[in-house]
Image: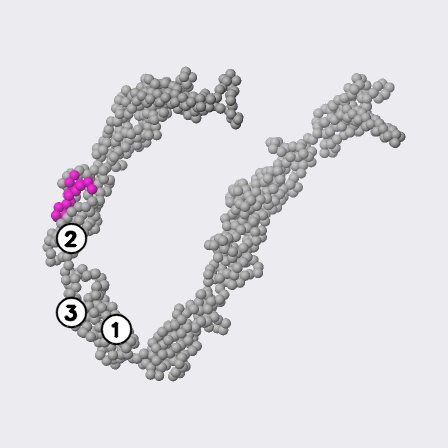
Amino acid sequence: MKRQHHFNCLQARSLGILLVWFCIMWSCTATSSQVITVKENYEGELPQRIGQISTSVSKGTFEIASGAGKEFDIENTTGWLLAVKPFDREEKDVYQLQVMVTDAQRKVLDGPIAVQVQIADDNDHKPLFEKKIYEGSVRQKSRPGMPFIQVAATDQDQPNTTNTDLRFMISKQMPPLPADNLFQVDKFSGKISTNKEGYKLLDINEEAQYTLMLTVKDKGDHNLGNTDLTEVEITLLPNLWITPDPVEVIENAVPDSPILKIQWNDNRAHFELREKKHPHSNLFGINKTSGEIFVYVPLDREWQDKHILLASARDEHGVLLDLPLEVSVIVKDANDNAPHFDHQMYCGVVQETAEPGTFVVKVTATDADDPTTPNADVRYSIVEQDPPLPKESMFSVDPISGRMTLSTAHVNRGEVNRYKLTVMACDMSGDEGGLNETCQVIVDVIDDNDHAPIFNVTEYGPVTISEDSPKGTKVMEIAAWDADEFGSKSWQVIFNVSDGDPDRIFNVSSNLKSNQGHLQLAKRLDFETKNEFNLTLTALNMVPLVEDARNGLSKAHIQVIVTDANDAPEFSKSVFLIAVLESVTIDSTLLKVTANDPDTKQHDPVRYSLDGDRFNWFTIDNNGVIKVAKHLDREKSGPMYSMHVIAADGANGLLTSEAEVNVAILDVNDNAPKVFEDTSTHRSLCHKRRDGQAVTLKAQDADGMNNSFPFTFHLMSQDHVWVIKKHNHSHAKLSLNASEVAEGEYVVVVVVSDSGKPTQRSENPIKVYACQCDEEGECILSSQQLSGGQIAGICIGVLLGIGAIVAVVVLCMNSKKQKKKQHTYETGEFKDQPHDEVPLKTVDEECSVHMRRNPEEWRVRSNVKYTVRARWGLLPKMSHKDSESS
């Protein structure tokens, strides 16, 4: 064990010695190694001193032991390394030399010394494009910044230096239409794309070919550098983001393949789809990457025959690339709807003596399918007749119109009084495979109308009715009798007024169940227009009479007498309009209104009165003459004064009518303008004139615009202390004209005139305070300059403040006594500290807290001398100087 341990110690010691020797040799080698840098392409005198060899000996002979070749030499005594010829870094960039220092007997004093000569790069190579001509294509509406071609260049100079730091730029665009900057190139990568202008302006219909002159330059962003040129031929391709043609999809089916594919101008877009009318519809979908549009659910043309889809393209950040495209999907019709009759049962009649071709009834069926296709082309046919007597084809139907007629003459009502027909409507033009529906047609065979109705009474009246009877009033009841079959259309009677009523004031209501009628008013009566009617009434059946019918046409006569009723007066117009100057004299006639009493037998006069004359400016007499009773004032009433004229019936005054009277009161210049202080400014000016400082004055005039604006301003005084300048049509600015005035209050009389004729003017005293100002141009008032009311207010505030201070101090002292705590002011510590370890507050601390929370209150309470800013309406503030003195 001891031997093994001794052996391990020896190994460790040997290893340590080797490491020390290696470090010494490395250190020696490192200290003797030297690096010399020399620039290539030297053009000065040769040989060129490029660096002096460092050595530890003071004297010796230097010589290059190895690596010199034909490029280097050395000065034997000084150790200067010499370059015999210029270097080319691209040929060789590093040289390794060994230098020895010897004495006269060539004994090595130092060395070998490793010398590395590094050749520094000179920008002696220009960058070169890989191609002289590049060719590329880009689509119209391609995204700005999306590369469509990349150019590349190389430089033989030293990599990773400014000599090979290349920059690309577009030096020229041909043609420069519609602008000269439609493209851009990334200056670092050489990737070419359209810019925002190109995105908007490139149009293949205007220009399809472009040539770019591209420059590449080394030296990075320095102004100087070597350059090279190349051409980029660009072909403009059509924009793929265009509205597609409408797509047709057959209803009730889901296509297996996409119905359409939309494309963006590059392959990095993501697509979205929604329906325009129904954004949340799930009928359609789109592949987000390929742009293929699918139909997910069978479509129904009858519900919606056209769908408008909005397809959007977004970039990788979700930003819309362009406006959405409208995709129209036309739903083609499939024969999925049978014809549908308007009624499931139709009724018709035919007389026994009807001739072949006599119209019976018309049936109608509609088909919800596309009316432009055979799917909705309906044909009619009779499929069954019950009973089939006297033969099966008693009736026929037009296959296109559905008009049914009698096919055979002499229908025998005694044999069959009713037929039941089954009519079918079939689409697809009636061809095999079409859809169909049937309906029932009931045809009644009726007796011939060979008896005319007869009035029970042929002479009625006279009947009296008042002219004020309302519309619909029953005048009298009439009746007729018919010998034909009870309840049939040959028996039912319709009454008409055939003569004596050209204005159709009367009508007759008919009861087909009882053949009775009522003569009633269809319009209002007017005794003054017509007071007697002689009416002729006729009675007719629902079906025409046969040629040899008995009795003929039956008529009755009715005399109606209209009685007079009292009517309200009537004005000639419902609205009267008159214009008058507001300066019109009292008792002037305004206008005359007239209301006539339509009652012809009454001659009582119409009485007039005014309603709505709120200022009692007018009067009206019994002749309807309206006169001016008081002076008018347009500024009080406004430009339009409205009232009503009441016309009362002279008989009892209960019936009245009214008309509106609008009086346009025209303005006259009867008001002088006045000056008002603009509330947005103040009346204080610095007693030493400051440029731009002025008091803004505003003038107002109660008259209309023609007699007010624009206003003219000037000063009453001519002492040239003040000056007033017009600001606009209604405002002026008052300022100091003198360079300085004494502090104090001034009354400046401003005269303002309007533009009316004759001109009105007013003199307006304006109070302006000239004061001492601070640097901001704000007035400063001392306590002596305050008004009595202000000083009184301040004094009251001071007294209240002192009282509040005393109250707070008393409260603080009471609080201290209640807590019974002792405080040592020298140490700031408390005795009898409670167990919660929260320090108790002293009186001073309590007061200081109150002062921090209410600084303005304490500041006012503790000062009797004030300085205030002269902005009117602000509370006084204590000056900094007074605060220090207090």
Q: Amino acid at mark 2?
A: Leu
Q: Amino acid at mark 3?
A: Gly
Location of residue 818 with respect to 427 vertically, above or below? above
Classify the position of the N terminus by image quarter: top right
The residue at the point 41 percent across, 69 percent down is 341
Mark identifier at residue 461: 3
Q: CA distance from mark 3 to mark 1?
A: 22 Å
> Would residue 618 be counted in the magenta stretch?
yes
The residue at the point 28 percent across, 29 percent down is 675
Residue at the spot of label 2: 654
Binning the other alpha carbons within 10 Å of mark 3 as few (below 14), some (14 to 19) or many (20 upward) gives few
Q: Position of residue 620 (x, y in %)?
A: 14, 45
On screen, residue 277 versus residue 18, left or right, reads: left
Binning the other alpha carbons within 10 Å of mark 2 as few (below 14), some (14 to 19) or many (20 upward) gives few
Q: Confirm whether residue 233 shows in the render.
A: no
Under circle 3, the secondary element is strand
